[in-house]
Image (cartoon, grey):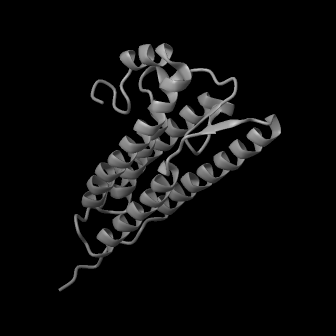
Amino acid sequence: MKVMEPGISIGTWVLWGIWFTAELLTNIRSKRMQKKLGVTLQRRDRGSAIVILIGGYALLFIDYELRSNQIGLVTGPWLILGWLIALSGICLRYWALAVLGRFYTARVAAQDGQTLVQRGPYRIVRHPSYSGGLLILFGFGFALNTWVGAVIGSITLFLIYAYRIAVEEKLMLETFGSAYRDYARKTRRLIPGVW
């Protein structure tokens, strides 16, 4: 007999709406700013932006399906923990993007006059917006009532980000040379003290 499955809470929908809106507005603002400033981009994305976009939403769909089929079901405090983790990821991601300011682009690219940012969360890790993305997806796994989805989503997104980071760091080395090498020696990529 199938146990009554918990629904997706209003809090989870609200949090998803905040995240989706923030992503949309950030990307619109970035494109407008580049157009206004007449920014020339050296694009080196190699398809990583589309992989992140499709992968991230596919992973949320997988979380939803796992929840619907009651695989790895969690409720109560885990749901609240998921909200807090996702919210902390949202805050970290948009703090990192705010620190980048006009240098933020959704695709891997270097701009004329770009400087190597090493302040704010960039003092701790080289790719804090991706660290935030991992926290967001991990938290949403719990917020969608499935610990299995949280684990699968985080591991998969980590692999997607590893590809993106390799592409991005190649461009950063070409753009900043020894300054970026020195910075890389002092900081980890995503997780302080680990990787």
- All told, the count of numbered labels is 0
Q: Which residue is drawn at 51% across and 31% down?
A: 171
Question: Could you say which is closer to the camera, residue 106 or residue 142?
Answer: 106
Which of the 4 image quadrants contains residue 3?
Answer: bottom left
Q: In this view, does 71 lie to the left or right of 131?
A: left
Q: Residue at x 54, y 20 (%)?
A: 176
| Residue 118 seen in the figure | no
Which of the 4 image quadrants contains residue 130?
Answer: top left
> Which residue, as the protein is rendered here, is positioned at the far bottom?
1
* Position in image of residue 21 (x %, y %): 62, 54
* Position in image of residue 77 (x %, y %): 31, 53
| Residue 188 seen in the figure | yes
Question: Could you say which is closer to the camera, residue 116 or residue 7?
Answer: 116
- Placement of 182 over or under 51, stated as above or below: above
Q: Residue at x 70, y 49 (%)?
A: 28
Q: Residue at x 17, y 86 (%)?
A: 1
Quadrant location of the C terminus?
top left
> Which residue, as the protein is rendered here, is positioned at the far left?
1
Q: Is residue 56 left or right of residue 23?
A: left
Question: Could you say which is closer to the camera, residue 45 or residue 130?
Answer: 45
Q: Is residue 155 left or right of residue 1?
A: right
* Position in image of residue 66 (x %, y %): 29, 69
* Position in image of residue 30 (x %, y %): 69, 42
